[in-house]
Amino acid sequence: MPRQIDQAARLAAIEDAVVSIAADAGFEAVTIRAVAKRVGASTSVVTHYVGSREELLCNAVRRELDSRRAEADAAARALDGQAALRAVVEWAVLSPTERSHRFWLALVLNAAGQPTLRGELNRFNQWWNQRIEQLLHEAGSADPAKEADLVSLFVDGIVVSGFDAGQPWTPERRTKLLDAVWATLSF
């Protein structure tokens, strides 16, 4: 009798491998062969689930970014105005793991040269910008578009600063900076 394979679990393992490889070594290291090796399977197993490297990247990155959107939305659930905004920004600054930050940095650095990555990053950024502007508007911001740029710059800066410093800034340091950002907003 043939062995039963959980198709969804196998695809999830393949996508997790893409994210892990990208976080560890960048997207240029993501190949069908590298993914197969990471999941302990042959390349034919990987290509059974995805037809190309582009599809492999698209599926994995989309799943990862959709997961982040869901986490951000969950952080703000049942909140409104300033509380919802603060919850989303605190989630972005304090919750993701170092692996998540490494994945994000790899995505940003490689998006310019890989249209698939650029498309997924654009899709996420469009959602993020709209969500932050909406929350700022609900919080009473005088200029939601300008302040959304400030919030995004702060969040991205926290991620990059961890790499520049050799390790992520402590949650206490990030929280102090977050308090300074709140003080500059117009509501």
Image (cartoon, rainbow, N blue to C red):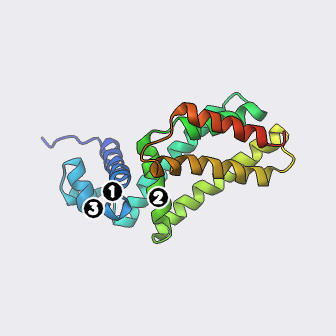
Q: Nearer the viewer, residue 176 or 61?
A: 176
Visible in this render: residue 38? Answer: yes
Q: Residue at x 56, y 46 (%)?
A: 158
Label 1 vs label 2: CA separation?
11 Å
Is 48 located above or below residue 141 in the figure?
A: below
Residue 175 position in % (x across, y down): 61, 33
Q: Residue at x 85, y 40 (%)?
A: 140
Residue 185 position in % (x across, y down): 79, 43
Q: Is residue 133 left or right of residue 102?
A: right
Q: Nearer the viewer, residue 169 or 110?
A: 169
Outermost residue on the top side: it is 78
* Tag 3: amino acid: Ile
* Tag 2: amino acid: Leu
Q: Quadrant of residue 94?
A: top right
Q: What residue is pinned by disc 1?
A: 25
Residue 26 position in % (x across, y down): 37, 59
Q: What residue is pinned by disc 2?
A: 107
- Please rate how many residues cluster around mark 3, counting C-alpha atoms within 10 Å: few if below 14, some from 14 to 19, many from 20: many
Give the secondary structure at mark 2.
helix
Visible in this render: residue 74? Answer: no
- Please rate how many residues cluster around mark 1, counting C-alpha atoms within 10 Å: few if below 14, some from 14 to 19, many from 20: few
* Tag 1: amino acid: Ala
Give the secondary structure at mark 3.
helix
Label 1 vs label 3: CA separation?
15 Å
Q: What residue is pinned by disc 3?
A: 32
